[in-house]
Image: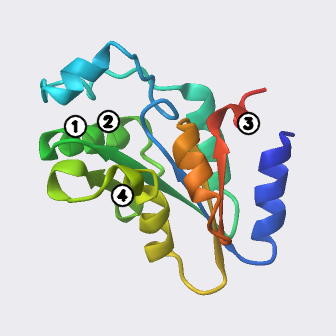
Amino acid sequence: MNSLIKEIKTKAKSQKVKVYFDMDGTLAEYDAEDKEKILSNQAGVYLTKRPLKSIINVADKLARIDNIEICIASNCHFKEQKEEKLLWLEKHTPFIKKENINIIVFDDMIFSKEEKDFLKANLIISNLKQNEFAYLIEDDHKIIRATNKFSNIKACHMSMFVN
């Protein structure tokens, strides 16, 4: 068994654990060529993303363990993209409760370049109750470093789940 999975299971024996998965590049393939399409808000970009089944399978297995809750912490630029992401997640990750899906829409917010890397961590912190611990499974190293500055969240690169 993977060491990160063991760690999460062990942590869940003593407290509630929320495992937040990023979508782009973690649960769904992220192609660098998509960036222009995303920034121009081209319709359908998120609907056609290839699911990364090995990571989705890990999330599904973790969801079946007592005291572990699976959540999404993702972001996008526009409201239309949020709707596409919700449809994609409904199709490919039906085991995740809708109320556990958190998608930050940049167009709805004002933040500095320095704050951008902390948006997911702040979202997770705002959703944690006392005596809960969270993991963020992410592909962006800047977000991982920023998130690991918080004591009750551990951010890990998605590759830690790949055998």
Mark earlier in primary sequence (3, 4):
4
Q: What residue is disc 1 on? A: 84
Count neighbours of disc 4 (C-alpha within 10 A) and say few if under 14, some if 14 to 19, many if 20 or more. many
User: Is there a contact, CB below 8 Å, between mark 2 and mark 4?
Assistant: no
Mark earlier in primary sequence (1, 3):
1
C-alpha gap between disc 1 and disc 3: 27 Å
Q: What residue is disc 2 on? A: 88
**Residue at the (66%, 84%) spot, across then down:** 131
Q: Which is closer to the viewer, label 1 or label 3? A: 3
* Badge 3 amino acid: Met
User: Looking at the picture, how far across and down is residue 129, in whole percent?
Assistant: 54, 83
Q: What residue is disc 4 on? A: 102
| Frontmost residue, 105 versus 147 | 147
Check residue 55 in the rendering and tell me which mark sits there, or answer none: none
* Badge 4 amino acid: Asn
> In the rendered view, does 150 fall on the left or right side of 13?
left
Q: Quadrant of the N terminus?
A: top right
**Residue at the (65%, 40%) spot, across then down:** 58
Q: What residue is disc 3 on? A: 160
